Amino acid sequence: MNSSNNVERHPKTVNPDSSTFSLTVNRERHTLTLDNRTTLLDALREQLKLTGTKKGCDHGQCGACTVSVNGERINACLSLAVMHEGDDISTIEGAAEVGHLDPMQQAFVDHDAFQCGYCTPGQICSAKAVLEEIQAGLPSHVTKDLNAPIEISDAEIRERMSGNLCRCGAYANILKAINQVAEVRS
Amino acid sequence: MDFNQSTEDNLFDHARVIGKPHARIDGLLKVTGRAPYAYERHDVAANQLVGYPVCATIARGKITHMDASAARAAPGVAAVITTLELEPLARADSNVAHLFGGATVEHYHQAIAVVVADTLEQARGAASLIEVRYEEAKGVFDLEDAWTRLQSTGEPVANVGDVDAAFAAAPVTLDETYRTASQSHAMMEPHASIVDWSDGGQMTVWTSNQMIQWTRQALATTFDIDAGRIRLESPYVGGGFGGKLWLRADAVLAAFGSRETGRPVKVALPRPMIFNNATHRSGTIQRLRIAAGSDGKITAFEHAAVSHTLLGGSGEDAVNQTRCFYAGENRRVAHHPIDMGLPESADMRAPGEASGLAVLEIAMDEMAEKLGMDPVAFRILNDTQVNPEEPSKPFTERHFVECLRKGADNFGWAERNLKPGGRREGQWLIGHGMAGAYRGAPTMTSGARVRLQNGRLIVETDMTDIGTGSYTILTQTAAETMGMEMQDVEVRLGNSAYPTSSGSGGQFGATSATAGVYAACVALQQQIAKRLNVDEARFEKGRVVAGQTDMALADIADGEEIVAEDSINFGDFKDELEIGTFGAHFVEVAVNAYTGETRVRRMLAVCDAGRILNPITARSQVIGGMTMGVGAALTEGMSVDTERGFFVNHDLAGYEVAVHADIPEQEVIFLDTTDAASSPLKAKGVGELGICGVAAAIGNAIYNATGIRIREYPMTLDRMIDQLPSTER
């Protein structure tokens, strides 16, 4: 979890079955009273009707539900909604400014980085986070020198994107899309 | 429109839109998360409830007792329907096991109840409260046993020439046995449906399905109602690969839930239930024998295979391609689908060929080595331009040799190391391998309706887009035919209210559905010509030109809509022809000399599939097949518990599909070919060609890298670690 935010985060009311809590999704604040068993993913899809975030496995195995929580990507299916009091969440619906796609979304279109489209929102959310993680110096399994700034490479991107499955097999095109955004940034 | 003979030169030979690289037109919806998939259609019906399935935990037997009282009393629960309350449902032809109903359990994770509640959490919680007792029956679950029992028995599907004499006479022969694993489609979107059958009258189904009419008919059969009462929508499908060709339990359970509660109900199959509840590709055991002269010419093939199926199914026909891929006067081919108690096996991407070529193309590599021939040259030598079983039947367009040559040139095949295990870079053994690819090019009747409204064209067909690019290529087809711009064409898909199409499957979708849209557009042109009272008209730049008339399409009907509908019907002249797609795959692998871990380093596919309708979406189809082929070669396999009769690794953690880190640079080259016998667009499918042969190319590269010949998929490191060459340097 992000430790930079020192505000104590507790749901307003906690009952055995449900809790009331507030969170911010795509810059909009919501107060929800939900069954404690509700995952963040189902809160987004079923309560807030933000269905861009997908459910592929509900077990943290496919990455289709990747969203950003306080700037870090997580699998929303592995997290209970009630744990997110005060959190700042962004989903695919918050990626595009009005009238403009996010550069990563545009790059996915440019490189045909999807087919059926079901994993795509998760891939895009992960891809945006991957570039930020590399820039922030967070190492991965393939990072060779932990003391040097991390260079964006195909190997780094592939490794860091490997939690997002794409059964249509668009990986090679997704890599090109991410590289396009990385090149424009640098 | 009847397609009764090969087409002449036509507008697609001078195309403006078809064959050009247009970005996927549904891309914007998909990258913004706005493409609506089945389970998330909050907009289509108010007051939806959620259903959660309960599945059998035995493979065979009877349910003796179910107690759902605690579930019924649980908070939020609106209904519980158990299988004991129903007679077995009628079974549509496409299903082998019953989807629901009755006390008999035919396979593990067969649906036995559905709990309907206000929320998923409530339904899932209550589902866990249902108590079930079984009387377990003995089952047969071991394919190895079946193979031992059945090989060399049964009637061959092909028996040409004198195979035994050919083998006896041949100076060079091969006789090996190979195994492919059971595989799961593992499409990213689970099976899911919302069904509104609130009043027991009209049934509306929002689902994720490749075949709208098949599934509508299957629902009609299952529930014994008139198909006219059923409407099905499936405009966006989150992957299918054959797994969504059929009606499955999600729609059936949601329908029962809706009728019982009088409200719309949605059901998604939880991922861990999909592997055993739904269909899969059967594993195979295959014996392949090849005989050749010392000149390298093949004289005989014998290919026998076993695969599993529930009683009445067809298994995985891994021998079919061996009947006509290569020359050779003598061949005997047999397939044994074995009735076993494992879950239902059915079609998965390139059913038959994906498993068959995974084996045949290793055998070809082994044979080339025995002959001391280059594997590319060996395949070129044994090319055939006719069906070798029926030499009077020619291939219409077969450019396999060109695929092989072009692939070898582009890949740098000539520079590879020839001695297995002979090239090492640090701790990695480097190898190169190749394989041929072959898959038929079937076509099916396909219809469409077009509506011209003030210069805009709306195309309606029940064709589906499962990631294949249907929206885009059908838009291109209509724009090309009508002389319009793509932005003036809107394609609407996946709705049973639209004319029946081929649907998506068997690599027939793109070819058939584009031809159907072409037929509908031609019918529209005829209507327009009639309206203008001319015999012939040209359609270009959004205008119709005929004699003195030169008019914008927007102006011809005074704001009135002009509607036309037609189907393409493919004639039986095709029965006298072999129409296929061909390819060659080349791969480079690195195998860790210490651990046996295989990394694929680069891949090239050269494809001969007639006119490529859109090189962007076609290329994506092919790299998708190549990626699935990497999984098939290296990681994918459903492990069978041969005692209890189920697939053990039934989720996406235990069943390992290829991930980003597994996939290297992939190159695809399309030959510039057309096939006038295939369709008016002279196109053929590529979606299944892309996976054909890939696994074998990887296996052959592993052999070239290590000298270890693995004849069992997936080629995991445990299959070679004890045979790795000495790592001392």
Image (cartoon, rainbow, N blue to C red):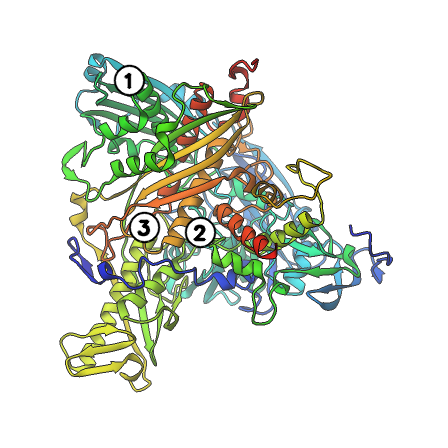
Q: Which residue is drawn at the image coordinates 27% and 64% (left, top)? A: B518
Q: Is residue B523 left or right of residue B470?
A: left
Residue B423, percent across and down?
47, 22
Q: What label does residue B508 carry, if any?
A: 3
Q: Is residue B431 left or right of residue B475?
A: right
* CB within 8 Å, label 3 to label 2: no
Q: Point out the tag, 1 or 3, that comes first from the N-terminus.
A: 1
Residue B383, percent across and down?
22, 32
Give the distance between the C-alpha atoms of the residues marked 3 and 2, in whole angstroms.
20 Å
Which residue bears the numbered disc 2?
B247
Q: Point out the tag, 3 or 2, that comes first from the N-terminus.
A: 2
Quadrant for the C terminus of chain B, please: top right
Q: Amino acid at mark 3?
A: Phe
Q: Which residue is drawn at the image coordinates 43% and 46% (left, top)? A: B241
From the image, state whether disc 2 or disc 1 is nearer to you.
Answer: 1
Which residue bears the numbered disc 1?
B371
